[in-house]
Structures are given as structure tokens and as C-alpha cells.
Amino acid sequence: MNPGEGIEVLLVRHGQSAANLRGLWQGQLDFPLSELGRAQAGRVGTVLREQEPSGIYSSPLARAAETARISARVTGYPEGDISYLEDLRERHGGVLEGLTWVEFERDNPELARRFFELPDDERWALLGAESTASAMVRADRALAEVRSRHAPGETVVAVSHGGLLGSFFLEVFGPEAPGTRNPLGNGSITRLLLEGESDLRLLDLGSVRHLDGLCEAL
């Protein structure tokens, strides 16, 4: 990257959580990392160490915050300097939170059927979950916060969640962008370049090359 081009942002999906391991829909419920998730966070740290980030931001939810702290330790970035942004929280999952999809479908067969028949915002409203529009407002605010604190040529890290990040990438870059229709793996890193006051350039989406054997089945 040309140092003057923009602010490079490494968007990290947290490591595997205890709920991911059980297949639960987490939303904004709090779960710690699993042992695999902690190992993934350490591998993320090895990538960040080479980047020498000037800022690390994180969702305050436990699985993201723990990923940020472990990564910071490996990087040598002071844990006390991590900034926790509410806007990086996962999307609220409504009645799905705390359940596997199989459990939800078993207990609410009609609701599960209607979920797949409705347009995006209507299906989430049906479940009492956060709308895509609301999630996009939060994602935009988080990036605006990063822009306001950093200058072109700097690299920063933001640790967030698969639902929020995946929805944001699909909305901004569209389904034609390679990988935007695929789930983001735990511990994956996406690289964006923030140019000017509003432009975004996608450099790399959902890379798990650094995990090398620590990827769980999606």
C-alpha cells in the first residue's frame, strides 16, 4: 500500500466462541472464546505484529474483546489502549439468540418457514432482530470513528462479528464481489482501505491463511 493512499483497516472476526462450538445463534449474548478460539486469536496477533497497528478497536462483547486482548499481547500493543466501540457489537438476533437453528425450527416450524419466504428486513423484523439498515448505520459510524482518529498511511485493527461484518460487506460491495456470499470464518481477516472522506476499497476478504490448520468446519 502506498502510505499516502488511505487508512488500512484490518477487520477481524473473533475467534471461535463456546457458543460457536455448540452451534448456537449468539447475537448480543455473551460467550467466551473456546480453546481453539484462543489459539486463533494468537495467530491473528502474529499477523498484526507485522502490521504495527496504530490503533486496535473491538466490540465489547466477551468473544471479541478476548480476541482483541490476546492479539494485542502477541503484537505488543498495550491492552489498556484497546478502544471498545458499541457500534462493533454483533447484530441482535431476536428470538434466535441462544438457540441452534435446529432447535428454533423444531419449536417454531411456521416461523422458520416464513423466515425464508420474506425479504431481508421483513424476516429480521419477524424475529424481533436488528434490521440490516440499523446494522449498516452502526458499521458506518464505527468506520467514521476510525477515520476521525487516524491519518492516511496508518494501519488499524477492528475486531467484530460475523453477522455484522458479513452484512456490511454484502451491502457495500454487493454479491458480485468474490466471497461476499460466503460465511466469514472465525479468526478471519478482511483488509479495507479507507480513502478520502467516504471511499472504501476492498483489498482482501475473509483471509484465513494465517490460521494454517486452526480453521473449524463452518
Image (cartoon, grey):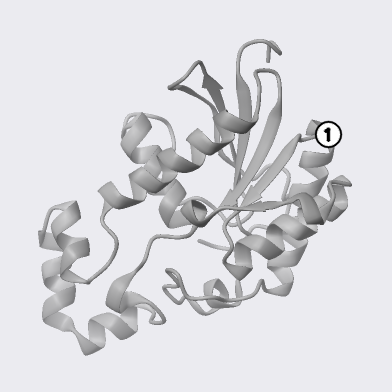
Residue 195 x, y percent position in the rendering: 52, 17
Let me know if residue 125 appears in the view: yes
Q: Is residue 142 left or right of residue 119?
A: right
Q: Is residue 51 left or right of residue 23?
A: right
The residue sitting at 11% across, 69% down in the picture is 114
Question: Residue 140 versus residue 63: which sits nearer the camera?
Answer: 140
Q: Which residue is mark 1?
A: 50
**How many other residues sit within 10 Å of disc 1, few (<14), some (14-19) or many (≥20)?**
few
Q: Residue at x 59, y 62 (%)?
A: 60
Is the residue 200 above or below the residue 82 in the image? above
Task: Give the residue type that dot 1 points to.
Answer: Glu
Residue 68 position, x and y percent, is 71, 55
Q: Is residue 16 visible?
A: no
Name the quadrant containing residue 104: bottom left
Q: Residue at x 18, y 54 (%)?
A: 121
Q: Please, what secondary structure does the residue beneath circle 1 have? A: helix
- Image quarter where the N terminus lies is top right
Residue extending farthest bottom: 107
Task: Pick whichever, 88 or 121, lies toward us.
Answer: 88
Q: Quadrant of residue 27?
A: bottom left
Q: Residue 56: percent from the left, percent from the top?
A: 70, 45
Left or right of 142 in this view: 153: right
Q: Tell me where residue 65 appears, x and y as whole percent.
A: 66, 62
User: Residue sitting at 67 percent across and 10 percent down?
Assistant: 4
- Number of marks: 1
- Outermost front residue: 148
